[in-house]
Amino acid sequence: MSQLLQHLINGLAAGTIYALVALGYTMVYGVLKLINFAHGDVMMVGVYFGYSTAFMLGRAARQSLWGVALVFLAAMVGCALLGFLIERFAYRPLREKPRLTALITAIGISFTLSYGFQLDLGPLPGASPRAFPQIIKPNEWFIIGDRDVVIWNWQVLSLAIAVGLMLLLQFLVFRTRFGRAMRAVSFDHRTAALMGIPTDRIIALTFMLSSALAAGAGLLYAIKDTSVSPLMGLYVGLKAFVAAVIGGIGNVPGAVVGALLLGLVEEFVVGYAASTWRDAVAFGFLILVLLVKPGGLFGRVAAEKV
Amino acid sequence: MDDGSRIPASLRGLFPFLIALPVLALLEWLSGDAPFATYLFSIVGVNVILAVSLNIVNGMTGQFSIGHAGFMAVGAYVAGVTSLALKEQALSFLPVAASDQVFFVVALLVGGIAAALCGFLVGLPSLRLRGDYLAIVTLGFGEIIRVIVQNTEAFGRALGLSGIPQSSSVFMVGFWVFLVVLVARRIAGSSHGRSLWAIREDEVAAEAMGVNTTAYKVRAFVISSFFAGVAGGLFAHFVPIINPGSFTFVKSMEIVVMIVAGGLGSTTGAIVAAVFLTLLPEALRSGFTMMGAEGSLAQKVDQIRMPIYGLLLVVLMLVRPQGLFGTREIWDVLPRWLPRRRGAKGVPQ
Amino acid sequence: MRRPVPLVLAALLLGALACEKKAQAPSAPNPGASGAPSAAGGAPAPAGTLLLGVATALTGGQATFGISTRNGIELAIAEANEAGGVKGQKLATRVYDTQGKPEEAASAVTRLINQDHVALILGDVASSNSLAMAEKAQAAKVPMITPSSTNPDVTKKGDYIFRVCFIDPFQGFVMAKFARENLKLSKVAVLKDNRSAYSEGLADVFVRKFTEMGGKVVATESYSQGDTDYRAQLTAIKKQKPDAIYVPGYYSEVGIIARQARELGLNVPLMGGDGWDSEKLFELGGSAVEGSYFSNHYSSQDPNERVQKFVQAYKAKYGGVPDALAALAYDAARVAVDAIKRAPDTKPASLRDAIGQTKDFAGVAGTITLDENRNPVKSAAVLKVGDGTYEFVTTVAP
């Protein structure tokens, strides 16, 4: 019983972070119909921003409340800027070109970032994984039985931050003028432009938002798994992407549900079946979902207009 | 059909073979004692087969597949295991070398057919899935193959499969390159190809025009994965060890990049891009060795080639988003003073 | 119907051009730089220089091991050159990146042999890559020494392939024996990396030996290289209440595994192999790895003067304590240099014989005597992880 509970906690913790990353994929797909393959790598860069900020702050400062806030802020602002640059110089010039070209650019950027960060030149970090500093001082928050299940303060805090970010996103998309503009662009960007919506600016802002979200997710991931490496974006990015598709890519609640489902499925495969088959089951689950519901769980399959 | 020709149609089909085979034999003879050139030619050849075959699905039919390395893996492992099983056998009526080559071809065909079968299985969901979703299914397929290989004792698990007879040659690789190009061009020019182009341009309209889209899509998948499997089989016979790490998502992406850089739908574009992108890292390596000579600079620079490769992709897309040739073939874009083929417009722009 | 003809011609022409170009490109710069190819062994290196080939992973998931390996080799070569080189010649290295992929490794080795005409080859870390390289080196009859590929199959490729480290079965045996006899454990769980042949090899031998010695393996779980969340596996292991967990993986994962095990309240010692050896283990694992044991080739704490001299030199050149991979690479390069000195000339066959005769060679990672299978006969050290250091526990002989 306690084991089941522990698996549930693990699965949800992993799923929450997949969800934050998956939201970024989904938002960008929503406005641009582009699978932003570089998203995971942007996340990785964000974690390194946070990593160096935490180091500059020193041990005492980074464990204080404002220290944690500063680490998150630095990473999210840095990533928003990176997202802006990528959109401006790599995607915008291709807006009217076939969708595939932008996809290739995304892959190119992903290559550049993930391999670039493996160099050990100048400020670049080198290929080996690094320990992420404990910016939240670990404390046992809740114990069941004889340490059968332990819930830590940072797990609760991470969950709170993740839920907070999701609520903020929900508010932004559905309650603000920017959100309405974003949904309009997503619906039909040409018509939106005719209606006086500055589509370029909205798309740029969406990119910045999704990159900032990725940075936040990456930091939570780094806090959870205590490490950072140049290849982390590839692994997390792929899984989050799968999660977004399971939920129906382009759909915000779908991404969250898909991510939580994926986190739990992976956890239970390892816990109760064979750990060697985890990745196969994750992708098998994806294919199964797509075969039953071709648009993903929450996606609509629009009838094609002729 | 060219009415001016006096040669019987049945003989004209043999023409390409009559030219290709002696050229290949010559190449084989030339590369006889240059192992590195042979190795490079083989790698380039395999990548050309992969690119041209993927182009049949992605370029001509417009179905976005990003799991080509999975089919390659199926071919490589199945052909490898077949070759290992036949290693001690020989056909008594043939000299050993010749019988080895026969077995090699058998192994390649077995690998190709196994991959084609997988292509059929993956092609089936395309009845229901479109665009990005199909892409994800192919990606998932590639990953599942990797996990299966990693957990199967007969495939050598994580260490990989080694000891496969290294019976590949420039001639054999070149022959399959020739075959895949021939098939791709014949498809592009046939009524079958027209149907594929129609599906690519507008699936609904194609269906309305009476094209059995499902059958054509699945067929494109089967042909494409057969050649990917053969490419894998060839690969297994000149790389001393095959292991799951060689057939990852990154490999699939490299092939996609090749056909996009060459121009989706252009067979010659895929060839040129595959040759260029395969040789580029090696050329960069040569250049850097030349500049930095010995010492740590050259090594640092050796690491830089991967990020540079990424940047080049971005720049290429920004400067020429339609790829090298778009949907045209190389002779459509040659300078005007070169003799051109008549009626070159075979494909929609 | 005429369409394919020009096409085929174009394709073949392209293929021919590419092939031709590559064959010439690397040889072109070298004569330009050094006048004419030197006569010795036909090596197109600057006159008076003997070129050694290094192929190892400088990018990708195995890059950290490859970089340590490269550093160790370069240190040994630099020292040999300071001491006046060999046979009146300076030594030089040409390093190629294998990206951790067998096909890149095969390509790098083919290039080293046929374009750079190296005298011998050093590398790689991962056994899959070394197997690919060994096949090519053996076919071309160029001696190859792998510093740290522990899979038994590597040196079985032929008489030109050597290594300076012990092999996987030995390491698995060492830890099984240590767990059973020294720690008196009876219930052990195994957590292995199923993307790594190294990890699988160690785990298989450990399970077999430990069971033979009367112990019980209560759970076998696996993860994939690059994972950072092991909670699911550890939760499943926890249910079986083992006395210890055998984690024959790399430090990059082990540090994190240790942290997460402690976090889940799994406070039993971990055990592992030489893949643990890195300063980074302390950084990644923190206090969670303390009290764990692993088998290794050498200990940087070893008071032996030879070892300390190497550690100091390495620190001075690269900063940071050398790990076992650096030490083995250093040994491999020194074995090579020693063999070149002893050999009558630098012909591949003479070098092969000279390397094969290596006997009682004082390396930093143990004394090396190569047996008839071209593997060294060495004992392994078992180390205990302390607070930022390793404590030497015992030596287990073959």
Image (cartoon, coloured by chain):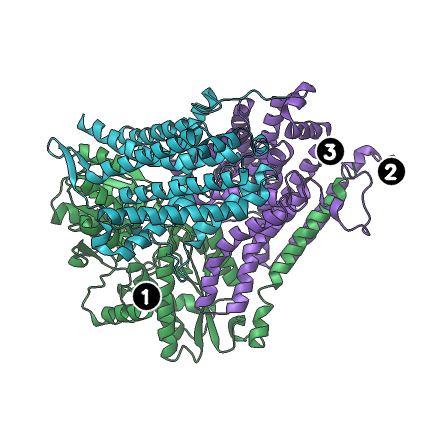
Chain colours: A cyan, B purple, C green
* The C terminus of chain A, quarter of image: top right
Compared to A74, does A271 lie above or below? Answer: above
Relative placement, left or right, of B182 versus C101 is right
What is the three-letter code of the residue carrying label 1? Asp
Give whichever of A176, A25 is nearer the camera: A176
Give whichever of A249, C330 is nearer the camera: A249
Q: Is residue B333 visible?
A: yes
The chain that hosts pointer 1 is C
- Count residues near mark 1 (Cα–Cα under 10 Å), then give few for <14, some for 14-19, many for 20+: many
Q: Is residue B235 visible?
A: no
Q: Which residue is mark 2?
A: B5
Which residue: 65% across, 48% down? B272
Q: Which residue is mark 3?
A: B189
Which residue: 38% across, 58% down? C66
* Image location of residue C382, percent across then percent down: 19, 55
* Image location of residue C360, percent across then percent down: 27, 68
Compared to A158, does B195 lie above or below? Answer: above
* The N terminus of chain A, quarter of image: top left
Q: Quadrant of residue C22?
A: bottom right
The chain that hosts pointer 3 is B
* Image location of residue A129, percent across then percent down: 33, 51
Whether labels 3 and 2 share one chain = yes
